[in-house]
Image (cartoon, rainbow, N blue to C red):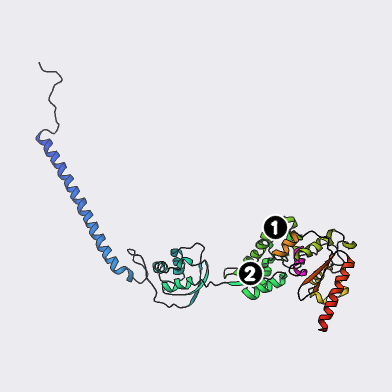
Amino acid sequence: MTDLFDFPAVTPDAGPTGRRAAARKRAAARRRRRRRLQTSLIVIVVLAVVGVVAYNTWDGVSGLLKNPFAADSTDYPGPGGGSVEVEVPEGATGTTIGQVLHEADVVASVGAFKKAWEQNPASGGIQPGTYALRTKMKASDAVAALVKNEKVETKVTIPEGFIATQVLDRITSVTGITKEDLDAAIADPASIGLPDEAGGNVEGWLFPATYTVTPKDTATTVLSQMIAKTIAELDAQGVAPENRLDILKKASIVEKEAPAGFFGQVARVIDNRLYNNCDANGGRLGMDAIDAYGLGIPASELTKAQLYDADLPYASRKHPGLPPTPIGNPGTNAIVAAVNPPEGTECWYVTVNTDTGETKFADTYAGFQEIEAEYKAWLAAKEQG
């Protein structure tokens, strides 16, 4: 007996018609594959032809385009033409320097410079900065020029005790930055980092040191460096912002008045005269350097009338306390002395030998008169001899 559900499987295409349809589908698939293969082969052949043509002709097309299939290592024969200034940035690699020089037309290609840079064992010592090079240099010559480290820069040295006008004159004479540009920068205190406590006056804030000035520098950047160094020095000595101006006033007096080796003791005299009532002097400093600064003359030219003229704001024998402003730009030693004067009761001093700088101190006015007499005797002997 046959199972009701045990029928032979029926295939729709089992007949002749179904087999022909399946054959047609297979043939069509084969044709599509052949067409795709033919198309791919045509594209490959075309690309190969274009590549060969491009490789052989690209560099010569009007000289405007470079061969994209090879690294450009074109080099100039040298020695070069006109002068050009280039800036090597901080932390620059050989490739970065090559790009800078290529853009300035110093070298013909980045590749040529990179190769020369790699071949020169001293190239790792190239320093950041501005260099004067020629245009159209041979890459190896450009590397050699940079290795010499002959940067376009100027050294400006500001001595301790220079007053602001002397500092500005020095900057102008050495760097070529104009006085007008310096004045304009000072007229905008915020642009140069001058603190509010300075009251817009740069006197005392232009730190004496040697500065490197590059072609990129301006009046603003140069003055900013000087002021920043003064602030850094005051911070290093633990001077609070509200005390900065007084410290600079004291330090500037020390810088002008004290011979080398006596900064601390002169700073002590200043504090004693201000705060300890030296022989009832009423807090008056009575120091020639202050009066001379206010009048704009050497201390040797001061007259007695000028010393006691109450109408002169820097008349230190008439007005108690510190002068209206610093009287110059003090260096580190003077600032340190003003911040930390040694203990002592000295109220007067006289440099009894200006050849050696020997200076003597006294606690009383009578003691001052004695050492003053010693100085006069030394001076008389010097003039006679």
Mark 1 surroundings within 10 Å by alpha-carbon count, few (fewer than 14), some (14 through 19), many (20 or more): some
Q: Quadrant of residue 328?
A: bottom right
> Up-down: is 302 above or below 43?
below
- Residue position for label 1: 237
Q: N-terminal of the two: label 2 or label 1?
A: 2
User: x%, y% of residue 211?
Assistant: 62, 68
Q: Is residue 231 left or right of residue 125?
A: right
Residue located at (86% from left, 61% from top)? 283
Q: Which one is closest to the eye, mark 2 or mark 1? A: 1
**SS at badge 2:** strand
Is residue 226 rendered magenta in the image? Answer: no
Q: Quadrant of residue 326?
A: bottom right
User: x%, y% of residue 377?
Assistant: 85, 77
Residue range in magenta is 249-260
Report the Cα–Cα distance between label 2 and label 1: 21 Å
Specify the label residue 210 is tagged with: 2
User: x%, y% of residue 104?
Assistant: 47, 70
**SS at badge 1:** loop
